[in-house]
Amino acid sequence: MTAELVRGQNHPLSQSRLEIRISAGTPIVAAAALGDEDGRIRGTGWVAHPGAPTQPGLEVSRQAAADHRLAVDLDAVTDAVHRVSVLIALPAPAGAPGPSRFGAAAAPFVAVTGLDGQEVASYTITGLAAESAVVALELYRRQGAWKVRAVGQGYAGGLPELFTDQGLPEAAQLAGSINEAVAQGLARSVQAP
């Protein structure tokens, strides 16, 4: 049975190997950040993104797309990790297709599934306006067990503001490298006829 979450609600996870599916109706960038016991990202190596798509226990897509699948293995993250935040952002490179703020797009939908495709929890992120980056949800460790929480925290300042809020000193540099990787991916893609 799927738990349909609302902002702030959580749900226990009985599996450690999960897939997170994101659909937004417009191209978005998906990333995942590892957080310590205080929820802080300790460095750029704690973020899986299009320019660095794999980190221990995480794998994300290399490009901007309307639909994403992220692979998560909670048993493979280090003991220092207490939180896995799923991040989505609108592409910032010049010439990127689509809107520049989530308020001009369909509400993003996020689903946590087992490897069998069975939905565990889902969350539709509503109420976004000027935001261009969002912490969609987080998987977090509490007393040895993992749970998922619907977050929906948006940032009008995009990825730099989001990473700064998560305690990352290199926020602007990381956001720049993500945008550069997305721009390279867009340059390689073939336009539809």
Image (cartoon, rainbow, N blue to C red):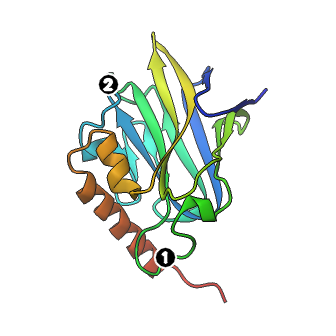
Q: Nearer the viewer, residue 104 or 45?
A: 104
Quadrant assignment, res 12? top right
The numbered disc on residue 32 is none
Does 54 appear above or below 17? below
Amino acid type at mark 2: Asp
Residue 174, horizontal then vertical, whole percent: 28, 56
Amino acid type at mark 1: Ala
Q: Are marks 2 and 1 in contact (CB under 8 Å)?
A: no
- Residue reaching furthest to the top: 143
Tell me the element at label 2: loop
Q: Nearer the viewer, residue 135 or 157?
A: 157
Residue 84, horizontal then vertical, whole percent: 44, 34
Residue 49, horizontal then vertical, whole percent: 40, 54
**Residue ID at (41%, 59%):** 50
Residue 93 visible in rendering: yes
Q: Quadrant of the C terminus?
A: bottom right
- Residue reaching furthest to the left: 169
Q: CA distance from mark 2 to mark 1?
A: 35 Å
Residue 52 visible in rendering: no
Q: Nearer the viewer, residue 129 or 142?
A: 129
Asked whether, in this view, residue 101 is left or right of residue 34, the answer is: right
Residue denoted by label 1: 96
Tell me the element at label 1: loop
| Mark 1 Cα shell of 10 Å, populated few (<14), some (14-19), many (≥20) | some
**Residue ID at (40%, 73%):** 93
Residue denoted by label 2: 38
Quadrant assignment, res 185? bottom left
